[in-house]
Image (spheres, rainbow, N blue to C red):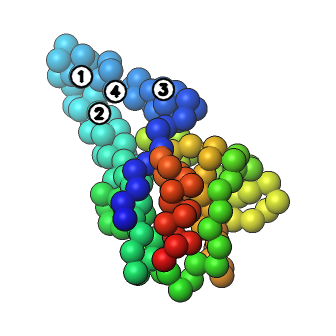
Amino acid sequence: MYFRLAPRDLTLRIMTFIALIPLIPLPILYLHGRDVISIIILLSIIVIYGFYYVIGPIGYSYNDEGIKIKRIAGDITIPKEDIVDVSIIEKARIDMNLDGNKGLFFYSGTFCERNGNKVKVHATRFTAMVRVRTANLDYYLSPKEPQAFVDAIKEI
C-alpha cells in the first residue's frame, strides 16, 4: 500500500521560501556581469538544495517487508519484524535537530525529543504524525492520512 505525504506545514513552507530567496538575484547578476563568482555561488546553492531535496521523503509504503520511506535518493526500510508499535502523535515534542534537514523542503534526519530520546524524522509537518517504534529507534512520519496508515500496518 502506498501513502502520500501530508501537506507541508506553514513553518516548512516559510523556511523553504526564505531559503530559495538567494536564488533570485544570482541569475540577474550573472546576466549583467557574467562573473565567475556568481556562477560558482549559484551552482553551489543548487547542488546543496538538490541534495536536500533528494534525501527527503516523497511518500510511504507498507508491504510484507515493512515500512518503506520513499525517497528519490533511495528508499529507507523499517523491517516489519523490528516494528514494536505504531501510533498517532498529535504534536511532536521536538527540541533540536541533531543532523539532517530542518526546514528546506522537508524535515528529515535525527532529532531530539524534549525528553532526550533521539528519533528519526521523515516528514512534512510536526502535527498528526505517526510514530513507528522499533527496538532501538523511533521514527516520525507524516502520511496524509495517519489513521489509515496506522490501521494498514496493524492489520497486516
- Asked whether the residues under the numbered discs 2 and 1 touch, taking CB atoms below 8 Å apart as contact, a structural biologist would say yes
- Asked whether the residues under the numbered discs 1 and 4 touch, taking CB atoms below 8 Å apart as contact, a structural biologist would say yes
Label 2, residues with CA under 10 Å away: few <14, some 14-19, many ≥20: some
The local secondary structure at tag 4 comes to helix
The local secondary structure at tag 3 comes to helix
Q: Which residue is mark 1?
A: 27
Nearer the observer, disc 3 or disc 2?
A: 3
Residues at marks 4 and 3, CA–CA distance in whole angstroms: 10 Å
Vertical placement of residue 5 versus 151, above or below: above
Residue 146, horizontal then vertical, whole percent: 55, 53
Residue 44, horizontal then vertical, whole percent: 32, 41
User: Of 2 and 156, which appears nearest the observer?
Assistant: 156
Q: Which residue is mark 4?
A: 23
Residue 61, horizontal then vertical, whole percent: 39, 64
- Choose the circle earlier in sequence order: 4 or 3: 3
Q: Amino acid at mark 3?
A: Ile
Residue 40, horizontal then vertical, whole percent: 27, 37
- Choose the circle earlier in sequence order: 4 or 2: 4
Nearer the observer, disc 1 or disc 3?
A: 3
The local secondary structure at tag 2 comes to helix
Seen from this angle, which residue lies furthest right? 115
- Choose the circle earlier in sequence order: 1 or 3: 3
- What residue is drawn where x is 40% and y is 56%? 3
User: Of 31 and 87, which appears nearest the observer?
Assistant: 87
Q: Is residue 76 visible?
A: no
Residue 138: which numbered mark, if any? Answer: none
- Choose the circle earlier in sequence order: 2 or 1: 1
The answer to whether residue 68 is left or right of residue 81 is: left
Q: Is residue 82 visible?
A: yes
Residue 18: which numbered mark, if any? Answer: 3
Q: Which residue is mark 2?
A: 42
